[in-house]
Image (cartoon, grey):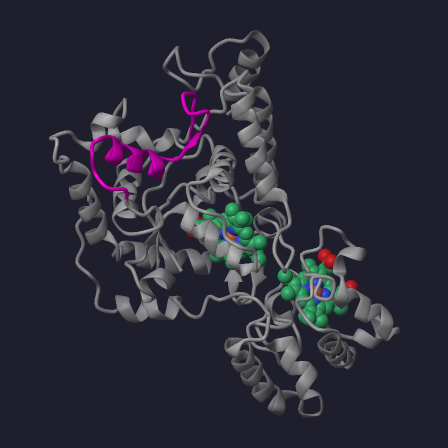
Amino acid sequence: MKTTKTTIVLAALFGLVGGMTTNALAAQQDPSVQADINAFQNYFKNKFQHLSLNDFSKGPYAMSEDKRLQFDAIMEFPPFEDLVDKGEELWKTPFRNGKTYSSCFSGSDKTLRTAYPKWNSAKGKVETLEQAIVNCRVKNGEKKIGTGKGKLAWMSAYLTGIATGEVINVIVPKGNAKALAAYEQGKKEFYAKRGQLNLSCANCHVDNPGQRIRGNTLSPALGQITHFPVWRGKWAKKKGDGFGTIQRRYGGCNKQVRAKPRKRQKAAYNNLEYFHTAMSNGMEISGTEYRE
Amino acid sequence: MIIKSIKGKGFSAFLLSAMVSLAIFSAPAIAGKKDDKALKKATKTCQKLYPSMTQGCGLSFSRRHGNCLGCHQIQKGAQPGNVGPPLIAMKARFPSRAVLREQIWDATVKNPNSLMPPFGRHQALSESQIDKITDFIHTL
């Protein structure tokens, strides 16, 4: 860790390419963003000194031994594997024009998940992995599909599964004022109180992780995105199949505080996802997981 | 997928028990059918627990009204959260009913970053509902 930090500091000082990226052409992290990430992660590390960085990905289950045992028991026989298999099949099935999803992306499928959300310079906005998949369909003459659950969530879950152990590295390119503004907007969305109950994401997931609201143990915001889409018992009980994307989950948390959920794959949530994911940079993708 | 699994038999029962009700707060408090139902249910519970304060207790316990149990322990209240302090010895700590009411009406006056919803200021509860809740909480 110490060496990484030194590298980052040096990179910031001398404008070198950061030690975390292997590609010399890859954009460098904006230093103010890196400072935010360090402060954010240190806050949680100090609060929960017995946890390693990757432990935070277990959310509420990292907060007590009992909860962790429950989680481990369920993950021994994951209830969602059939759907992930379906996701793999969908992902690998060529479009009618013969091309595949992979043709829309550079690099290996295995690491796709780690760089999203990504700044799209051509469009001048943040692009999520889910949106990139939809765009890929449209580019190849296929219909759009929904971004909350169903087929897209299964494909996305497949990509999260094969990325297990790969390290999250979301970049807000240095010197790109528009990208930084989008990131700042996402940060604002995260810290602003909203809704009739007047609560911010940070009120629950930064100020009170480990505490309970009714019977629900609050997860720390650090590591909240390492395992999405998640398969939730709650979502499986209702219509649908149990899988939901991160933005579907945002909608649920908004409703809890009686705030109107934002539209999925529009600027407000995309920028929030940009900020929220970048805060977990350096953590490993933990694969698709179960949540209550 | 990488790991192929046999589904454990005890699994579904286990899953169900892990899936107990997850609604923390439930949606808007503009009185609708669901609100009435939630209040009725809470009030019924309160008839046994606090027979002389059923209305105030019901409004405090209902997930679609005060939902004070979401964040506070209240004696005899089931499944409390703990992000706020237990509501005990209220008369000792809030000799003045008006100060207590103010806390419930808008907790952000004392603490702008409070987790406690500003029930009055945001009209999540009516004035008369806040009165009933204050009366109940003051007896604790």
Q: Position of residue A21 (x, y in %)?
A: 41, 18
Q: Is residue A136 magenta?
A: yes
Q: Position of residue A56 (x, y in %)?
A: 47, 44
Q: Is residue A63 visible?
A: no
Of residues B60 and A80, the one nearer the viewer is B60
Q: Position of residue A85 (x, y in %)?
A: 18, 47
Answer above or below: position of A14 versus A215. Answer: above
Q: Is residue A147 left or right of residue B8?
A: right
Q: Position of residue A62 (x, y in %)?
A: 47, 50
Q: Is residue A52 magenta?
A: no
Q: Is residue B1 left or right of residue A259?
A: left
Answer above or below: position of A137 versus A224. Answer: above
Of residues A109 and A130, the one nearer the viewer is A130
Q: Quadrant of residue A91?
A: top left
Q: Is residue A81 left or right of residue A71?
A: left
* Residue found at the very far right of the displayed protein: B96
- Quarter of the image containing the C terminus of chain A? bottom left
Q: Residue at x 80, y 71 (%)?
A: B101
Q: Residue at x 45, y 54 (%)?
A: A61
Q: Which residues are magenta?
A: A117-144
Answer above or below: position of A78 versus A247. Answer: below
Q: Residue at x 53, y 30 (%)?
A: A182
Q: Quadrant of residue B73?
A: bottom right
Q: Is residue A67 visible?
A: yes
